[in-house]
Image (cartoon, coloured by chain):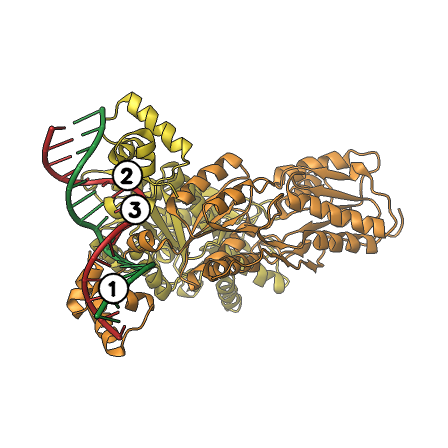
Chain colours: A orange, B yellow, C red, D green
Amino acid sequence: MTTIRDVAKHAGVAPITVSRVMNNSGYVSDATRARVEAAAAALNYEPNLLASGLKSRRTQTIALVLTDITNPFWTAVARGVEDGASSRNYTVIFGNTDESEAKQERYLSMLLRRRVDGVLLVPASHTGEMVGRLRAREIETVVLDRRVDDIEVDIVRGNSEQGARALADHLLALGHRRIGMLSGPADISVSRERVAGYRAALEAAGIAVAPTLIRYDAFTVEGGQRMAQAMLTLDSPPTAFLAANNFIAVGVMRTLHAAGLRVPDDFSLAAFDDLPDNCLQPPFLTTAVQPAYELGMTAVERLVARLASEETLPYEEFVLPTELIVRKSVRQVCEE
Amino acid sequence: MTTIRDVAKHAGVAPITVSRVMNNSGYVSDATRARVEAAAAALNYEPNLLASGLKSRRTQTIALVLTDITNPFWTAVARGVEDGASSRNYTVIFGNTDESEAKQERYLSMLLRRRVDGVLLVPASHTGEMVGRLRAREIETVVLDRRVDDIEVDIVRGNSEQGARALADHLLALGHRRIGMLSGPADISVSRERVAGYRAALEAAGIAVAPTLIRYDAFTVEGGQRMAQAMLTLDSPPTAFLAANNFIAVGVMRTLHAAGLRVPDDFSLAAFDDLPDNCLQPPFLTTAVQPAYELGMTAVERLVARLASEETLPYEEFVLPTELIVRKSVRQVCEE
DNA sequence: CTGTTAGCGCCTTCAC
DNA sequence: GTGAAGGCGCTAACAG
């Protein structure tokens, strides 16, 4: 494998000059630059990023630690991150935590060993501990999707409260008065914010919030099934469901379908996050769509800006809007 | 940041002894080992993988170069790769080529610079050139999903021909005689193999293969739409479609739907690759399902085995079976 | 504009 | 079982 010294010799210059040409750092005359570039090309030289990272303490690597790449929402985020990173000459390494703090812990150790420049973190817990530990090692962090307690940090997230509010307002406007709110784990900020948006809508409409109509469970199909099942057995069940994410919505649909009930004829359904648009039937579900790709892209941009900046930037929160897309899963009700 | 020397000092040993403890290499007495481990823990020591990689020439990193992580098939492969790699202490870096050789080229250069130990490659072209160049740099490669010409290499792929054959046989058994084969780009091995499976089924059934009933286009929804459209305008259109991947199937469904035609009432449809199982309606499409996760897992396993092996292993081809799942998109025809 | 020196943190080699 | 020396390939800091 050819080294910087080989190129230097071939071009008749010192290794550091080759370094300056390859990195566009410092002054090099055009003539020298040309000679070095020719030599590098002739020898098929590829700089060793391990060596340069060891010396310069910058690895041009960022990590994306998320819950599960298999969820289409996160897939889109990951694609945004990868596009943003590779166009800025960063490489992405990624890991799935499956919401497990133990797995997150294991990844963290790996990232420290690799001396990544920065981390995009979807925290498995609501504490800022992980962020603090990264910062102690001088690894910049941008938190994605969720808030964390007790620490100031850059955050890039969709506007959960506004999105949930829009969905609930939409259901209310169509006459629904008993709306079942099916949320995610209670200790994750997005779950609480989506419930908060729901509450705000009901209160603004002067409707009492019934505790039995709010449930928390996993952000999964199974979670949605459990919650829908529970609500169907209420004395006075809801006329509409507000699902806090796409998988929960699928669980609701499956539960209703299994019970011989139809959407929107028997129950209305509105959901947070879109489903993959490559499903067979034309899109049907009324949703509040977060800009997943842009979330990923924004997060890398902020991280890279922070890495490139001389002075330390103030910590900011980037809240991207959520868009209400009305399709066909909600019907108007007239009486109740 | 604490180094191996700090730990050595703290434990009263030489740096090399710490190295031996951390890597489980060479003999270390239990007492010394305990002292070193205590020191490492006390100092929060995380070995610098850049430094160790520079010296040892092994980075514990593998790359996954695929077409587009956004396709649920590839997402599942990626998850399999990540799980397999992280359990063996490898980190995965990934890149999307979007089937572009230029992008693939750019990634390759990045991977060389990072001195990755191995590459899992979904080649953007059918030539073995990329594999050869990696091998020239002593980077082990396992090709995923596709075959390449002119070079021996490990390949892990689903059995395209068998899967297509099973789908075609199924359609034939239900009485279909005119089956439209909608395949991917003609220069990708899986496209040709799926057509080959289709041909074999027809020939075994003694049915002439009509050239107008075979088309090649992109593995996308748009490709599926174009091909379906073309076949609908034939003098005698097919009664069934065989889509060579999931996106093409979606394109077919959309085209038929737009034309007011229904599946399976008006046309039958069978497809290669499943759709994400989180679509709203219960799974409907009859498919030949490749074990995507296992493909990824198998590929890492082979790569890691190759990296760990003293002698050079023979190049093998791992062909995983494809499973026919009969659902509701195909109906029986009686006459023609 | 270009070069010299030194060292990043670790592991290979060889010695004891 | 343990250690000393040296170098992996690169660049920061300082000269000139």
Image position, residue B156 (x, y; %)? 33, 46
Where is residue A311 drawn, in percent x and y? 50, 60
Residue type at tag 2:
Ala
Percent of width and height locating residue B298:
35, 41
Q: Is residue A31 above or below residue B170?
A: below
Check residue B51 in the rendering and tell me which mark sits there, or answer none. Answer: 3
Q: Residue at x 28, y 35 (%)?
A: B19
In 3D space, how far apart are the residues under numbered discs 1 and 2 (Cα atoms)? 39 Å
Within 10 Å of disc 1 (Cα), the crowding (few <14, some 14-19, many 20+) is few
Q: Are marks 1 and 3 in contact (CB under 8 Å)?
A: no
Name the residue that disc number 1 marks.
Answer: A16
Chain letter of disc 3 in the image? B
Secondary structure beneath dot 1 equals helix
Measure the C-alpha gap from mark 1 to mark 3.
Answer: 20 Å
Q: Position of residue B60 (x, y in %)?
A: 32, 43
The residue sitting at 39% across, 59% down in the picture is: B209
Disc 2 sits on a residue from what chain? B
Contact flag, marks 1 and 2 (Cβ < 8 Å)? no
Mark on residue B305? 2
Same chain, labels 3 and 2:
yes
